[in-house]
Amino acid sequence: MNEGLGSPMPRRDGRIKVTGAARFAADVKLPGLLHAALVTAPIARGRLVALDPAPALAVPGVARVLTAADMPRFAAVTTPPMATAVQPMQDDVIRFEGQPVAIVLAATPEAAEAGAARVAARYAADAPLLFSGERAEVPSRESFYVFEEPDLARGDVPAGLAAAAHRVAARYHQPPRHHNPMENSATLAVWEDGRLTLHTAAQWTYGVRYGLAGALGLAPERIRVLAAHTGGGFGAKGYTWPHQLLAAVAAQVTGRPVRLAYTRAQMYTMTGYQPEVAQEVTLGADAAGRLTAVRHASVSNTSLTDDYIEFAHAGSAGMYATPALQLSARMARTSLNIPMAMRAPHEGPGMFALESAMDEMAHALGMDPLDLRLANHADADPSDGRPWSSKKLREAYGEGAALFGWRERPRQAARDGHWILGTGMASCIMTVFRFPASARITLRADGQVVLEAGTQDIGTGTLTIFPQIAAGELGIPIERVTLRHGDTDLPETGGTFGSSSTACVGAAVQDAARKLRARLDGIAALQPASLGAPAEAPEALLRRAGLADLSAEGRYEFGRPFDAAGHAGSHAMRTFGAVFVEVAVDPELGLMRLRRAVGSYSVGRIVNPRTARSQMIGGITWGWGMAAMEASVVDPALGRFLSKNLSGVAIPVNADIPADIRIHFVDEVDPHAGPLGAKGIGEIGAVGVAAAVANAVFHATGRRIRDLPILPEGLL
Ligand code: MOS
């Protein structure tokens, strides 16, 4: 099999993952290790009045209780790589339920937990601040999280609406949802000779290094971050969170290695979540279905301390051709922990609203929902008129519709016993994020190749894809390539988020391999010619030249450190697609099932069709969770998340997902995205699914559900 670009290589880490042989941050053991347990505030807002560590210190095995008084004052940090600008245990102010107020250190995890339960703390509580669209604020452009314009206007929306033959206007809402990765976040921190080493669960090893360097006032080179395997992230491990900072400080104060592993409940308050989002979409269209105006406004909740915002209009800015666009994003402060980017941030929530509204418009027009999308296909970026770097959305619609049998579907909802079957579709769009990356390849005289990059792996296939690219470029079997990764001693890469790793780190790997080949060619040219001899294996050439090994370093960069939404350059860059679903509804029991789905995507070159398909099935599964199950309910009296465990928060399992999910990629190379011609794909699979499901429910039952998730009480 050709093992290079485009080959469906199976995941090399599959066996160690399913057999439990893979070691995660919390699996690392060191002699003299202290286990940390956090004491967290039970109130959403107020002050810590008193804290007595004595009962905890009486627990056998408890070595130390650290409070704010024991902590160094952290330097003011910028976000990212710290997730939030205000660090815990620096003062007595409580800003969210679950905020850490003390660290109990003990010889065993059980003793630490028992000690934490006995720390006596008194609080003065203020009323929690709950989400309210009435208190919407414009986010600060100083915040890293505000990487788009909160307001975008083009053309005359009131005139477009006035001239429209058909108008729809509706409000949509979704609750907060958590990332719920399988691996709880954990850090083991150890100091040696003024140098700090962390074994941690991270989506960005270098980011953790920079975050801690800033907070602790250390040179980044004195911090080594190791993340061999990260057990899922979805954005929950993208930046630097309290477990990393507090473990590092606890290890510094005690002079011993410290392991701090979050409990599952702590994952709900110290790693972020997708915020609550309220949206309003207004569309106008002429009699032929061409949009005359698009207005999309959203409000999402944020914390008391940071301006995290969900740019729910990000998809609307790039999706459809329209003479008039008016987009706005606002935030409303709550006394909850900071929300965070979660798989398919921005477009994920936003396209639920836009694509539901488009279905409402298709119904108002009596038009096939797919034809309405085709009639409004944007041949250039609707927000600024730039040409696309590449776009084959028409093909994605057509090829996806054919796979699904969209044109042949029953126009009236079909029946299957108690079940009513409905079909629905939606467009998908996603921002293309890119980050610079470096990689090094070393060929040894024994024929083995070592590929090195600091990049972490969150289980998306990169441990296969990077060796695959190297093997393909060097023309050697992948078995000869060993990958070393997850270590800030290795060449710098960006975060594994924003669907960026394959395209960006992959480009650096390809560059390193090409440079290595060029060096080998240079060596060959210096050797005595062996005319007519068969092509020499690279390692044989190395031996003949008397070299033990040969290395080359590759780089991917594009002039700007952070390129959101393809803002840089002459072309607008996005990924596109369409999702088609068949949903069964039992109106007597309020049940809903996903029967089948087709996802068809225009996303640039596919580097590994097997891992790519797996990503998209994961995305559609994620979208089903958004449509039908997930809600992190906030208790209105206490201002905290109500069910901080996996038995209280429903997420899809295998039994929820049918075997009949078909994934299709249009044959495409994006010449502007980078040397691989690849763009990110990890997140677009989750976009549009909730709208397609809601549209199918409308088709099946005539009910338009605009509040997620779609639960039995909404279907009865
Ligand atoms: Mo994803 S929200 O970019 O980890």
Image (cartoon, rainbow, N blue to C red):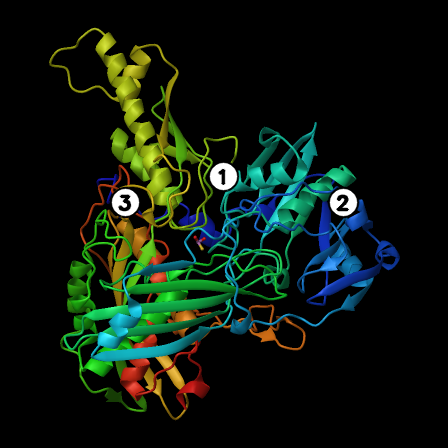
Q: Seen in the image, is 386 located left or right of residue 713?
A: left
Q: Where does residue 135 sit, x and y in percent of width and height? A: 55, 70
Task: Work out whether residue 460 or residue 86 is closer to the camera in this orientation and state it.
Answer: 86
Q: Earlier in the sequence, mark 1 or mark 2?
A: 2
Residue shown at 53% from the left, 73% from the top:
134
Above or below 653: residue 468: above
Image quadrant holding the C terminus, namely bottom left
Q: Secondary structure at mark 1?
A: loop
Q: Is residue 688 left or right of residue 190?
A: left
Q: Which mark is residue 244?
A: none
Residue 515: x, y in percent? 30, 24
Residue 283 vs residue 175: left or right? Answer: left
Residue at label 3? 678
- How far apart are the two marked residues, 3 and 2, measured between alpha carbons? 46 Å
Residue lying at 51% horizontally and 63% vertically, measured from the top left: 331
Q: Earlier in the sequence, mark 3 or mark 1?
A: 1
Instruction: Give the residue at the far top of this rendering.
Output: 528
For label 3, being within 8 Å of ligand 1 is answered no
Residue on which disc 1 sits: 486
Local SS, label 3: loop
Q: Of 335 and 627, which appears nearest the observer?
A: 335
* Between marks 3 and 2 in the image, the one whose residue lies nearer the viewer: 2
Q: Looking at the image, is mark 3 or mark 1 nearer the viewer?
A: 3
**Quadrant including the N terminus:** top left
Viewer-side residue, 313 vs 634: 313
Q: Which mark is residue 71?
A: 2
Picture quadrant of residue 348? bottom left
Residues at marks 1 and 2, CA–CA distance in whole angstroms: 29 Å
Callout 2 amino acid: Met
